Amino acid sequence: MRSCDPAALPSCDPRVTLSHSRVSLLGVLFIVWGVLTILVGASTLALGVAAAALINSAGGRGGFAAGFTAATFTILALIAILWGTAHIAVGNPLRRRRRWSRQAALMLGGIDLLLLPYGTALGVYALWVLLRDDAKRLFES
């Protein structure tokens, strides 16, 4: 194993290496969260389509509640699919330490805090990783 002089190479600094690993893990977690959210959105969309199909099979006599349910499932599904896509779109550039991805991940992580319990955990981890000084330096270059 070769020795490393931290003064000569900043990448040999253990704090930078640890921060690099945390940011990479956060990018992977964003991608996984995005894929899972898209799957939830797709299954909710299936429920919305099924509710609409039931209304049509009843000859349109489903009433207000059935139509409202179908519309609600469809709207929530589209929001979930967009939310998951946003996480995937930020997760990959975050792993590559693109300058803009840090701010986007902070924004998504801040909103994720409201999505109990897993979104809260992801949001707390995102804020903890990305607001550290050593992580900020990773995105400056």
Image (spheres, helix red, strand yellow):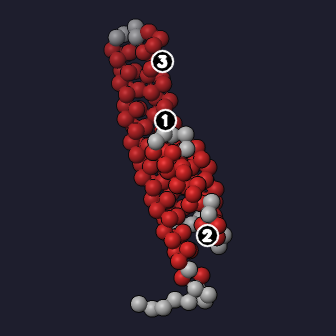
Residue 122 image point, x, y percent: 50, 50
Q: Which numbered tag is attached to residue 68?
A: 3
- Image height check: is 35 above or below 76? below
Q: Residue furthest bottom?
A: 2
Kind of residue at disc 1: Leu
> Dot 2: within a 10 Å radius of its alpha carbon, few (fewer than 14), some, or many (20 or more) residues?
some
What residue did someone put label 2 on?
134
The quadrant in which residue 66 appears is top left
- Image height check: is 73 above or below 61? below
Residue at point 56% right, 80% down? 13
Decide which of 50, 136 is in the foreground and name it. Answer: 136
What residue did someone put label 1 on?
78
Query: Under tag 3, what secondary structure?
Result: helix
Query: Under tag 2, what secondary structure?
Result: helix
Q: CA distance from mark 1 to mark 3?
A: 15 Å
Q: Earlier in the sequence, mark 2 or mark 3?
A: 3
Residue at point 53% right, 77% down? 14
Q: Nearer the viewer, mark 1 or mark 2?
A: 2
Quadrant location, the N terminus: bottom left
- Image height check: is 90 above or below 16? above
Q: Which numbered tag is attached to residue 133?
A: none
Residue at point 37% right, 35% down? 43
Residue 55 image point, x, y percent: 38, 15
